Amino acid sequence: MSEEMFLKYGCNPNQKPSRIYIENGKLPITVLNGKPGYINLLDAFNGWQLVRELKQATGLCAATSFKHVSPAGAAVGVPLDDTLKKIYFVDDLGELSPMACAYARARGADRMSSYGDFVALSDTCDLATAKMLQREVSDGIIAPDYTDEALEVLKSKRKGTYNIIKIDPDYVPEEIERKQVFGVTFEQGRNNLKRYEKMLENIVTDN
């Protein structure tokens, strides 16, 4: 069984038709609000892979700010001191959850590049994170879940058109990945390398 989602257009308005699909199974995402486009979904899936791997590697919740299929910033949910809260312009938001701290750090890595970003969160989007996002210029968000309060806040963004995507955290892609460039199909094994601290044990230089 296959499933597909038709899009308004591809990378550019003249690139039609446009869709995403999966040949065996169901798409791992549900659009809760808005109408994401081709670039939005590229950012969403690439961003989700990044925060998923950060969570696996560190055990901490993670966030990334993606723009045009490149990460503008990525971070894990480490607390912010008062100085960092001011630097990241979140000192007026009160108590920040680990998820909100992760996004503040990710967005703050390069605020200019993050303008109009697509957000990916490794864990549930809570109210604190949603309030932070409410005042940022952003195209959308992907996360495994949302609290009811967070969803209500996010749905009010961009006059109700903010892209909100829920992804199945248990989804495992096929081992072989493919992409087509200029009519030629490229194929390779997916990069499933596990990143653990023991990989850093063999230090080969004193510098």
Image (spheres, rainbow, N blue to C red):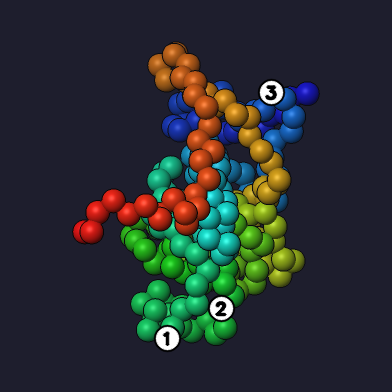
Q: Position of residue 120 (x, y in %)?
A: 55, 54
Q: CA distance from mark 2 to mark 1?
A: 11 Å
Q: Position of residue 78 (x, y in %)?
A: 50, 72
Between disc 3 and disc 2, whose residue precedes?
3
Q: In the displayed structure, does residue 1 sit left or right of residue 76?
A: right
Q: Is residue 76 visible?
A: yes
Mark 3: amino acid: Glu
Name the one closer to the observer, 43 or 18: 43
Instruction: Locate residue 172: give its quadrant.
Output: top right
Pointers 3 and 2 in contact (C-beta within 8 Å): no
Q: CA distance from mark 3 to mark 1?
A: 49 Å
Q: Which mark is residue 96?
A: 2
Q: Residue tagged by mark 1?
A: 82
Q: In which quadrant of the rendered image does the N terminus lie?
A: top right
Name the one closer to the observer, 125 or 134: 125
Counting every numbered tag in the picture gives: 3
Mark 2: amino acid: Leu
Between disc 3 and disc 1, whose residue precedes?
3
Q: CA distance from mark 3 to mark 2?
A: 41 Å
Q: In the displayed structure, does residue 32 sit left or right of residue 118?
A: right
Q: Residue tagged by mark 3?
A: 23
SS of the residue under disc 1: helix
